[in-house]
Image (cartoon, rainbow, N blue to C red):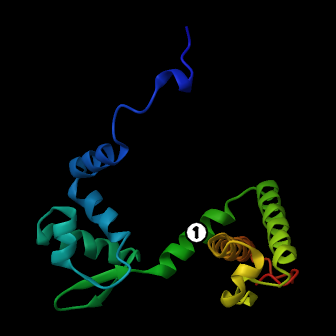
Amino acid sequence: MTSSSDDRGPPRSDFSEDLADRIRDAPADERVYLVALGLHEPTRVSEVAARAECSKNAARRHLKRLADIGLLTRVVENPASFERNESYFEWRRLDRLSRLSDDEYRRRLGELLSENETYRERYGVDEPNDVDPFEYAEYGDPEHVWLDLNNWAAVRREIRDLRRSRRDETADEGVA
């Protein structure tokens, strides 16, 4: 007898506890790396060590290695502070997008351009920033409109990044 998802019932374990256990059991370099991914503002080595549950020396060594490969930027020498190097993450994203097959590239770009056009028609403007936040209610539930506009901005970024990944500089119906 096969079991459907309805027969199984709710999960028996808490995903967040499983994740916390896996992180806690990970080697120090992996824990420091995971903490480093979230360094959106300058953060001292001691703070990283505390978050990664490792010594300051281990944190410093791994942070220096991550800075050497470009993932982090050393912001202050003493006390040593690091933050994410956003240009590194942008480069990685563009590199991944550049590896799409031609068919996958065209399919994704076509879907995104269609979605962009749907938003343009729905809101009667060329881009999400053209919608006045004080007039959200004109388009329906303000929270739904806000979510739409954020999604629309993400669609436009994806279109831009896809094109940049292929160095496709062709003009397109108003998408930067």
111 on left or right of 129: right
Q: Where 34 falls versus 148 (above or below)?
A: above
Q: What element carries label 1?
A: helix
112 on left or right of 40: right
Which quarter shows the C terminus? bottom right
Q: Please state the horizontal and vertical placement of residue 46, each as a whole percent of the image.
A: 15, 76
| Residue at x-position 34% and y-position 81% | 83
Report crowding for label 1: few under 14, some 14 to 19, many 20 or more residues within 10 A (C-alpha): some
The residue nearer to you, when weighing 87 against 135, is 135
Check disc 1 and give the amino acid type: Arg
59 on left or right of 140: left
Q: Where 15 falls versus 33 (above or below)?
A: above
Which quarter shows the N terminus? top right
Q: Please state the horizontal and vertical placement of residue 117, each as a whole percent of the image.
A: 85, 72
Q: Please state the horizontal and vertical placement of residue 47, each as a whole percent of the image.
A: 19, 75
| Residue at x-position 85% and y-position 66% | 114
Q: Where 58 falls versus 78 (above or below)?
A: above
Number of marks in picture: 1
- What residue is shown with label 1? 93
